[in-house]
Image (tube, rainbow, N blue to C red):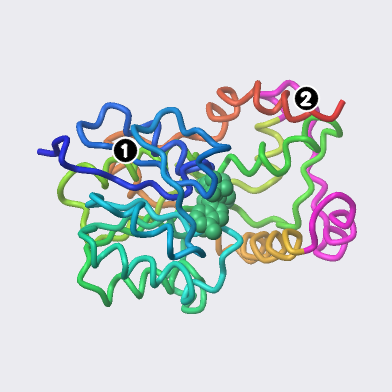
Amino acid sequence: MDSDDNRVLVTGATGTVGSRVVGALADWAGTVRAATRDPDETSVSAADETVAFDFERPETWGPAFEGVDRLFLVRPPAISRVGESILPAIDAAGRVGVEHVVVLSVLGAENIPLLPHRRIEKHLQGSSLDWTFLRASFFMENLVETHGQEIVERGELVVPAGDGATSFVAADDVAAVGTRVLTASGHRNRAYDLTGPAALTYHEVAATLGTVLDHDVQYTEPSLLEFVRHSRIGRPWGLTVVMVGLYTTARLGLAERVSVDAERVLGRPPTALAPWAGANRDAFEATGARVS
Ligand SMILES: NC(=O)c1ccc[n+]([C@@H]2O[C@H](COP(=O)([O-])OP(=O)(O)OC[C@H]3O[C@@H](n4cnc5c(N)ncnc54)[C@H](OP(=O)(O)O)[C@@H]3O)[C@@H](O)[C@H]2O)c1
């Protein structure tokens, strides 16, 4: 049974999944320490403690890891050279008493040796630490955070995914699994594929969002080149490149695998797109209002 002597450090605690992990750990008997690069600017109110932590500033690691026995590890999207930052941070965590690292990884990571997430996984598998890998599919939240404005204002979903289907998962479900594996026994040294209950094409996504949001939403189905041209305005080039890579995966049918792992861990089916969209109606509308 976990007690007050247990302490988890949640990295990425201000981000999509980490913030939800912090929130979901509210009833846990142990201590929840949230990591952010700028604790003076950012308060993570649901956490018991907030600490300065930067994978690229080793001087922050010691104070952040002190007294911690488990770690929720989010690879920041901007860090691709994990060998100079995240891998040595994991080693430092192990030296000062961290026993279990739960990694937010990517569906299919096991097949992509050069993927930063896979390098983190391999490093942990070769260490004396316990690990759990959460190999998550595409987050439903991307639809509101990245595409919400176009969906609400222009009624368009512009992604170069062709007819490929994607097994979208809700970030709340990823966080719920993360919380469970951090706090319950029986999940160490396992990898879970976290998907929603179904794989959907973007035609189906547009139709679902149109119905739930009561907007006309069209999937414009751009070619890769058309998408790059479309993205030139208002989106950083690096992000466009990442998006082309991600949506090419979907286009090729490599994002459509549906897994039962989330249901096995949670004891309930993962959230489907329509109820997720219903619960996020205000977030979609706010995305449009922000620029009007
Ligand atoms: N989006 C998807 O569909 C999807 C699906 C599967 C897996 N993933 C993976 O999930 C991860 C991203 O998770 P997310 O979407 O929850 O995060 P996010 O919302 O993109 O937030 C990034 C987090 O990283 C922190 N951060 C940035 N630079 C940092 C640094 N140098 N050191 C320490 N922390 C730093 C930020 O905190 P501060 O700014 O407060 O420091 C922030 O909390 C990526 O590895 C991505 O590949 C994403």
At 47% across and 62% down in the image, what residue appears? 55
How many marks the image carries: the answer is: 2
Foreground of the two, 50 or 279: 50
Q: Where does the magenta region start and end?
A: 210-237
Which numbered disc, 2 or 1, marks the residue closer to the eye?
1
Q: Position of residue 84 (x, y in %)?
A: 48, 75
Give the label on residue 215, or none. 2
Is 263 displayed left or right of 128 in the figure? right
13 in relation to 70, above or below? above
Q: Amino acid at mark 2?
A: His
Res 73 → quadrant:
bottom left
At 67% across and 62% down in the image, what residue appears? 251
Q: Amino acid at mark 1?
A: Val
- Give the residue pinned by disc 1: 32
234 in relation to 217, above or below? below
Foreground of the two, 150 or 50: 50
Ligand 1 within 8 Å of the CB at mark 1: no
The answer to if 24 sits in the magenta stretch is no
Question: In the displayed image of the protein, which residue is found farthest to the left?
Answer: 1
185 in relation to 46, above or below? below
Is 187 displayed left or right of 226 in the figure? left
Foreground of the two, 178 or 229: 178
Q: Position of residue 273 (x, y in %)?
A: 55, 35
